[in-house]
Amino acid sequence: MNSKAFLLALFSVVIWGSSFAAIRASLQGGYEAGENVLARFLVASLLFLGYALWPGTKFRLPEKGDIVRIAVLGWLGISLYHLFVTFGMETISAGTAGMLVGSGPIFTALIAFFVLRERLTKLGWFGLVIGFIGITLIAFGSGGETLTLTPGALLVIIAAFASAVFFVYQKPLLTRYSAVELTAYFTWFGTLPFLYFAPNLLETVQLATLEANLAVIYVGIFPAAIAYVTWATALSLAQASSVSSLIYLEPAVAIAVAWIWIQELPTGLALTGGIIAIGGVLIVNMLGRQRNMVKQREAL
C-alpha cells in the first residue's frame, strides 16, 4: 500500500473509531436508534448535495447501467450497516462494537481473495491473524464485558460482514466515478430507508440534549461523509484487503475516545489488545510493503 492510501485509510479509521462514542453519547442523550441514524445521514446527504450543487463543481450523474448496483451497495453498506450497528449499540459498549466491526478485514480479505483475485503474502496473513488476536483481547477486556453472542453483538457482526462486502464491491466503480461522487450516491440511496423514522425526528431533536445533537452533527459530517470519501480514495489507490487491514485499529480508537468522552475506562487487557492490533496493522502495511519494494527493485 502506498503512503497516500495508507494515510487516507488511517484518517478514515480514526474518524470512524470516534463515531462509536459519539453514537453512544447521542443514544444516552435522548435519541432512539432509528432517529439517530436518520439524523446523521440527513446531515451527510445535505453535505453531499451542497457539494454537488456548488457552482463550478464537476459532479456527474451515475450511468443507467450502474444505478441498481450503486443502490444495492448503498442499502447494504449504508442502510444495513448503520442500522445494525446503531441498534446493536443500544445493548453493547462502544469498545465491544468497535472490536466486532474490527473483524471486517477478515471478511474483506476472503471476499477480495475469491472475487477480486487479490493476494496477501504469508506475512500479510500473519498480520491479519495477529490483528484478530488483538481485537479479541479488546473485546474481552473492554469495560469488563465478555464476548457473548447477544442480539446486539450479532447485529454488529452482520454489519461488519455487510461493510466488508460493500468495500470490496465498490472498488470496480471507483474506476468510473470519483470517490466523492460514488460516496454521495451511496449516501443518498442509503438514507432513503431511514426515512421510516422521520415522523418522530423533530420531537427527538427538540427533546435531546445539546451534547446529543452535536454528536449527531459530528457523525453526520465526519464519519458518515468525509471519512467515507477518504476511504473510497484509498481503495482506488490500493488493494481492498491491504486497505481494510487498517480497520484493526478501529477498536483501539473506539476505546480511547470512549474513555475520554463518556468515561468508559479500558482495562489493562483492552489496552494490551490495542497494542497487539496496532502491531498486526504494522506487519501488514509496513513489513509487507517493504517486501514488495524489494521485489520491485529486484525486477528492475
Image (cartoon, helix red, strand yellow):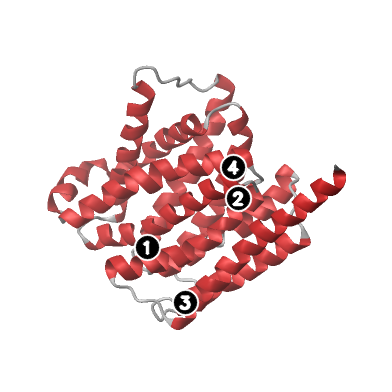
Residue 292 image position (x, y, % from top left): 76, 51
> Which mark is first along the chain, 3 or 1?
1
Q: Which residue is mark 3?
A: 270
Instruction: Give residue 89's mark.
Output: 1
Of marks 3 and 2, which one's residue comes earlier in the chain?
Answer: 2
C-alpha gap between disc 1 and disc 4: 27 Å
Q: Earlier in the sequence, mark 1 or mark 2?
A: 1
Q: Position of residue 99 (x, y in %)?
A: 49, 66
Residue receiving disc 4: 235
Question: Which badge, 3 or 4, is on the more N-terminal residue?
Answer: 4
Q: Residue 288 is drawn in which quadrant?
A: bottom right
Observer-nearest of 168 and 211: 211
Contact between marks 3 and 2 (CB within 8 A): the answer is: no
Q: Amino acid at mark 2?
A: Val
Give the class, few, some or many, for how many residues have Cα within 10 Å of label 4's Cα (few <14, many ≥20): many
> Distance of mark 3 from mark 4, alpha carbons?
29 Å
* Amino acid type of the residue that numbered disc 1 sits on in the rendered structure: Met
The reply to whether discs 1 and 3 touch (Cβ–Cβ < 8 Å) is no
* Mark 2 secondary-structure assignment: helix
